[in-house]
Amino acid sequence: MSNLRSNLTSDHNVKQLDTERILAEKAAEREALKESRRKERAEKLKERTYVEEFDRGVYDIKNPNTYEIMLDKGLNEEIVREISSIKDEPDWMLEKRLAALEIYRELKNPNWGPDLSELNMDEIATYIRPKAQMESNWQEVPDEIRKTFELLGIPEAELDYLSGVGAQYDSEVVYHNVKDYLALQGVVYTDFESAVEQYPEIIQEYFGTCLKPTLHRYSALHYAVWSGGSYVYVPEGVHVDIPLQSYFRMNAPGAGQFEHTLIIVEKGGSLHFIEGCSAPRYNTINLHAGGVELFVKEGAKLRYSTIENWSRNMYNLNSKRAIVEKDGVIEWISGSFGSRVSMLYPASILIGEGARSEFTGITFAGAGQTLDTGAQVVHKAPHTYSAVETKSISKGGGKAIYRSLVQVEEGAYGCRSNTDCQSLMLDAQSRGDTIPTIILKNDDVDFGHEAKIGRIDDQAIFYLMSRGLSEEEAKAMIVRGFAEPVAKELPLEYAVEMNELINLELKGAIG
Amino acid sequence: MTKINRRTNELRGNTLPALTWNWMDVNDVKIDLQNNQKIPYTAVQSVGEIDQELKHTFYDLDHGISEEVMRMNSEQCNLANHWRISDREPIEVRLPQSAENPLLVDQNQIIVPPLQNGTIVLYNYSEDDSRVERNSTILVDVENDAEINVVLVQRLNENSISNVSIVARVGDGAKLSLATVELGAGNTVFHYMVDMEGFGAESHVKTAYLGSGNNHLDLFYHVRHIGEECISDIQVNGALMDHAVKKFRGTIDFVEGCSGSDGNEEEFTILLDDTVRSIAVPLLLAHEDDIVGNHAASAGQIDEEQLFYLMSRGLSRKESESLIVESRMTPTFDQIPNEELRLDLRKEVHSKILHR
């Protein structure tokens, strides 16, 4: 008996020794493996050089800051009244502005998303009138301002492939024109101030009904101090065959731009609207809080494209919303490249049976940028369809965040929705998050969501290099390929511009 | 993070690691714990001695559902278990609740020493129709090269509420497999958070649920990749019927330095009735480029073709539906070592769908 017990204890000791030996062996093995795997990974991620700031070419050209009127920085009732009186507005508009100001005061910055604490409204001038009148002939636009737009290629584009152009410089629209044959069909394309004056009934009926001032703090701010922007009206059955474009340029430092865009496409009509934005770089904070309201009526189709290239001192807190009726189609094309902080989530409210929404977006966040972008779709009617396809790229410590909502309401039967979002990170300092929310309130839906996040596939690089490309070329080609779904939705000239922007962005990251 | 809503003074928890729009009400969830007394639990005896130091180390990692819920768990604790797992028979703990045992506030510590592997099943169920509450914390420490299979089965009645927080840590080359089955309770709040600290650590989660009646399910997962080359996946499969509401909120968090990691999450919901609510918030947070993260979520009715096929073989519509739902749950059920329990769960799913 005692023999047996001693056997058992020695067995136990042996087992104990075994365990320790095995553990030590395992630990040594793992250290060796860690080392070798680290080396392997390090080889894959070859040394990179970073260029913090680079020349953004024409986008960065600053004009001297000359203006006719610049209101004091900050925001109060006096300033709001002054903007209204400068614009010689009807009373109902002033009332709307004051009501929005009250809402703005009550609302706080969101507790989610990027940090907005640096944004101080006391440091921002909400209204700056350039030394220019609105013209419909580029030759009448003051030289300096015209040159800026010429460098950006706007007048040339107008001749070549646009049916109308609006150009806003700081707070006011300096140029607006639409081709005659469209005007004859009843298409209206004008700056928003003229619209308030000329079409008061329509503006009063639609203004602030799609995008409400109560939506969030910066939409309230927008309604309090809005200035400039465009109004487009496409009558029933009219197809605007070539795109219209509004270009928003901010030149003044420490200022805000708050343009309002309202588009109505009547039954069976169609329109492609392009929005471009840029600003030179300053060291003070600028704010862009525009508002876009789109009304797509029965069977109508609207494509809304945006290429946004604000400078890296801009807080881009823009709001866009579309209401789509029966069998209507809204297509969003969205490229976000610039700004220091962006919060932009175009929303489609599908209220009519068979309405459709398609969103295609690309976001490229470089050093010091936090681009929180995405899309929202609310299915309120049966047999509505939505698709979201987004691509995010981040590099050099940039943060690209994809945030979205797909909501299917009670009674919205037979809806289909598909989301595909991909994030590519070009280095370890960058951050790529996806934060989607899906809310389904009935059972008759067909819903799918997919997301991928990670590095460039080594095999793809290897394959391209085996075909004779350098590693840098291979990577650049993969990134361009990644952006292709967005590029192919844009008119050729804009796709070229977008590719150039990507090349510009990649300069710092690769090679 | 404890958050108490000031307006209504209600207790909230399971806060998302990255917040989003407040109006959608997905950032956190209401906690329905009503009991504030210490009542004994008499169905089973405690096992082992709670390691207080370990408990605090884990609370530093994560506060489970919320700090307040953790505090209630410490104060009202009426069952405390501490296991050191070694290679032997699976441990199965039955935790019945009834009018006699209306409250179960359990603390569990599962320690898996190096090189060991084991299975532990915690099975919580109602014996009658009385309203019962559970507030549970489960700490799992998987040391180097160890493996553990944790199975949680919850079958409380509709009147009851279940709150379970799991906080886990996984070492070098170690692996944690978690299977959870949620078939009951009017209000279920589930929280899983894992720190994969080791090189090549793994976390695999499978959840099967069936939401029925007026059940409200909140399924929260937070998987943090910290060590290099960690692998994780979350697979949530379930069905909703009647007026059930389900919130799935899963986060895969790639912390800087977790090079070579791979994380996946998948959520699939079958919607059986017009009146259900299905909410999904699948997050991917990446602070490291040398990783691969995927998430997929889908929801919809049962595929008509599959139904048609089964019905053409002579099954009724409901039989066929039940079969398809069960098949989605099978990978989770398969991790339960006890065959009898597996069969029981299948039967329950089957009869619930058949008699709806």
Image (tube, rainbow, N blue to C red):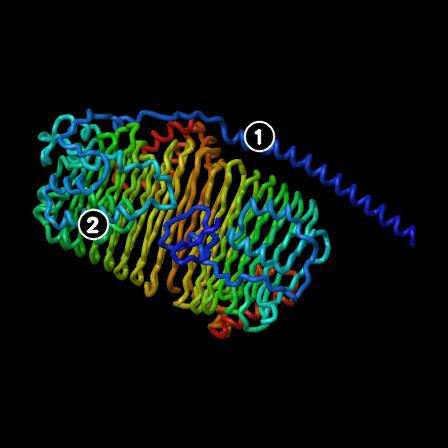
Q: Which of marks 2 and 1 is in front?
A: 2
- Chain at tag 1: A
Give the structural element (helix, strand or loop) at label 1: helix
* Marks 2/1: CA–CA distance: 62 Å
Residue that numbered label 1 is attached to: A39
Q: Which residue is drawn at 22% across and 30% down?
A: A252
Q: In which quarter of the image is residue B273?
A: bottom left
| Mark seen at residue A99 | 2
Q: Is residue B1 shown to the viewer in this render?
A: yes
Give the image location of residue A352, x and y in percent: 25, 60
Q: In which quarter of the image is residue A54?
A: top left
Give the image location of residue B97, x and y in percent: 60, 68
Q: Residue at x 52, y 64 (%)?
A: B161
Give the image location of residue B174, x and y in percent: 63, 45
Within-10-Å neighbours for mark 2: few <14, some 14–19, many 20+: some
Amino acid type, residue under disc 1 in the picture: Lys
Q: Is residue B83 left or right of residue B67?
A: right
- Chain at tag 2: A
Give the image location of residue A381, x and y in percent: 29, 62
Mark 2 or mark 1: name the one nearer the start of the chain: 1
